[in-house]
Image (spheres, rainbow, N blue to C red):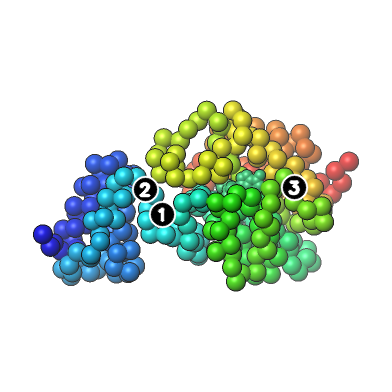
Amino acid sequence: MPSTLAQAIGWARAELVRAGVGSPDADAVLLAAHALGLSRGETEAKAILGAAEPEGYRELVRRRARREPLQHITGTAPFRQLELAVGPGVFVPRPETELLVQLTLDRAHAWRESGETHPAVIDLGTGSGAIALAVATEDPACRVSAVEREAAALPWSRRNLRGSAVRLLECDYRDVAPETAGRFCVVVTNPPYVPSGEVPEDPEVRDHDPATALYGGDETGMLLPCAAMDTALRVLRPEGSFIMEHAESQVELVARALADRGFRGIQVHHDLTGRPRATTAELPEDLS
Ligand SMILES: C[S@@+](CC[C@H](N)C(=O)[O-])C[C@H]1O[C@@H](n2cnc3c(N)ncnc32)[C@H](O)[C@@H]1O
């Protein structure tokens, strides 16, 4: 039976609540916006003005109620000023990772103040290209490289980075080419860091984010984060910065691993909800 947009959004909200979706109000409207090809605000205005339910909306809602990620259904994920293409095979960028971009931009700015006109930045494990592309877009003076290894993720990295100034290195971040040694001012990474025994509860994460993007390689989740630190030791310039996202529970493990490798100025950073989710550190001028 045909219904109004407002009635359909009300039905969708109830379906999503029943399915345990964490943000039923927003998702009901965003799926309608996707079906209509409009913004969220325009969709809400149309609903108030009595517009009709868009064709195909109910099927989109049913997919979401089966806990397919919203971003896989719409095909895009917002990240800072960007709308990134995402889908099966690639990690959906998260709002908390936006903090890493700001920390990178701040350090790039400091390098420029000290006379480095084009600070070199490298993003280890770029996935959708979120961090690398945001840095390159917001500070075009940076020379940004991005590393990704996974065959399923790479089509998304290529697609989002195409036409940008970011250089994509299709390899394991443990093996970045020796010619990059000592070249970078900033190494930034959101590596896989979930401990192997801690399977995420949310079906959107557990069943749809690639395992190769989630799990850090051992029971502490620290194997791949530590490998990123080892790469940073090789590719950073003296006094270069390392910036990494991690779980709240890993703050001390991360600080210890950085200190053991000779990093200095270790600082923990909190996300917008006040959780300690990133750590920065500097390579000393002389590591010996
Ligand atoms: C948590 S996701 C982060 C993706 C993106 N940087 C973001 O923040 O949304 C980790 C990414 O690292 C990639 N990755 C995992 N191990 C890697 C390795 N050894 N070398 C290169 N990339 C790796 C995964 O495929 C995945 O895309």
- Distance from the alpha carbon under mark 1 to that under mark 3: 31 Å
User: In the rendered image, is residue 91 in sight?
Assistant: yes
Q: Image quadrant for the N terminus? A: bottom left
The answer to which of 270 and 95 lies nearer the viewer is 95
Q: Image quadrant for the C terminus? A: top right
Please provide percent x and percent y for residue 25.
28, 52
Q: Are marks 2 and 3 in contact (CB under 8 Å)?
A: no
Q: Which residue is mark 1?
A: 72
Dot 1: element: helix
Point out the tag, 1 or 3, that comes first from the N-terminus. 1
Q: Are marks 1 and 2 in contact (CB under 8 Å)?
A: yes
**Disc 2 residue: CB within 8 Å of ligand 1:** no
For residue 231, side relative to residue 127 (left or right)? right
For residue 239, side relative to residue 122 (left or right)? right
Spot the residue most to the left: 1
Q: Which residue is mark 3?
A: 175
For residue 273, side relative to residue 258 (left or right)? left
Question: Which amino acid is tagged 1?
Answer: His
Point out the tag, 2 or 3, that comes first from the N-terminus. 2
User: In the rendered image, is residue 189 in sight?
Assistant: no
Spot the residue most to the right: 288
- Distance from the alpha carbon under mark 1 to that under mark 2: 7 Å
Dot 2: element: loop
Q: Which residue is mark 2?
A: 68
Please provide percent x and percent y for residue 215.
56, 37
Q: Crowdedness of circle 1 by 10 Å Cα count: few (<14), some, many (20+)?
A: some
Q: Crowdedness of circle 3 by 10 Å Cα count: few (<14), some, many (20+)?
A: few
Question: Which amino acid is tagged 3?
Answer: Asp
Spot the residue most to the front: 151
**Residue 167 lies in what quarter of the image?**
bottom right
What residue is at 75 percent from the left and 42 percent from the top?
Answer: 230
